[in-house]
């Protein structure tokens, strides 16, 4: 998961979701249904917005997402962005 400044763990109908990234960008998300760690959400920034949009999606209030995502740090990711 690299150099991560924030993490969030939320409960959803498909299991716990682990989100990570910075205050400005979401870097990743993983479905982690077996996770035993406590649930926690960030107080501000991109992860808070991601949590809000995911919760709205599962509540049936959203069908798409509008999030600031960190570009993949790989040669393939760079090729896809160019």
Image (tube, helix red, strand yellow):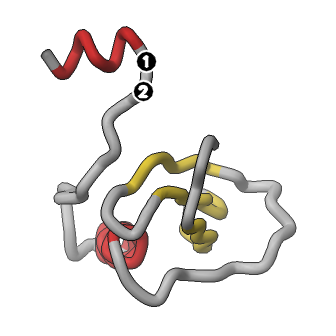
Task: Tell me which corner region of the image, top left, top right, bottom left or bottom right, holds residue 74.
Answer: top left
Query: Eyeballing the image, is 49 above or below 69?
Result: below
User: Where residue 66 appears, x then y in whole percent?
Assistant: 17, 59
| Residue shown at the point (72%, 55%) measured from the top left | 33
Q: Are marks 2 and 1 in contact (CB under 8 Å)?
A: yes
Mark 1: secondary structure:
loop
Answer above or below: position of 23 versus 17. below
Residue 22 image-quadrant placement: bottom left
Pointer 1 local density, CA inside 10 Å: few below 14, some 14–19, many at least 20: few
Residue 70 in the figure: left or right of residue 20: left
In which quadrant of the rendered image does the N terminus lie?
A: top right
The quadrant the C terminus occupies is: top left
Q: CA distance from mark 2 to mark 1?
A: 4 Å
Query: In the orientation shown, which residue stands out farthest toward the front?
Result: 3
Q: Which numbered marker is on residue 74?
A: 1
Q: Residue furthest bottom?
A: 43
**Residue 68 at x, y percent in the picture:** 24, 55
Along the line of sight, the residue nearer the viewer: 69 or 65:
69
> Can you tell which mark lies on residue 10?
none
* Residue occupying the point 38% across, 10% down: 75
In the image, residue 43 above or below residue 47: below
Residue 45 x, y percent position in the rendering = 35, 77
Determine the image quadrant of residue 77: top left
Secondary structure beneath label 2 = loop
What residue did someone put label 2 on?
73
């Amino acid at each position: 998961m690299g150099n991560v400044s924030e993490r969030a763990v939320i409960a959803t109908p498909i299991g716990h979701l682990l989100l990570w990234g910075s205050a400005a960008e979401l870097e990743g998300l993983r479905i982690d249904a077996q996770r035993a760690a406590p649930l926690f959400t960030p107080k501000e920034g991109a992860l808070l917005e991601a949590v809000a949009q995911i919760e709205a999606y599962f509540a049936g209030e959203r069908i798409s997402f509008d999030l600031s995502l960190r570009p993949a740090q790989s040669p393939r990711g760079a090729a896809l962005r160019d």
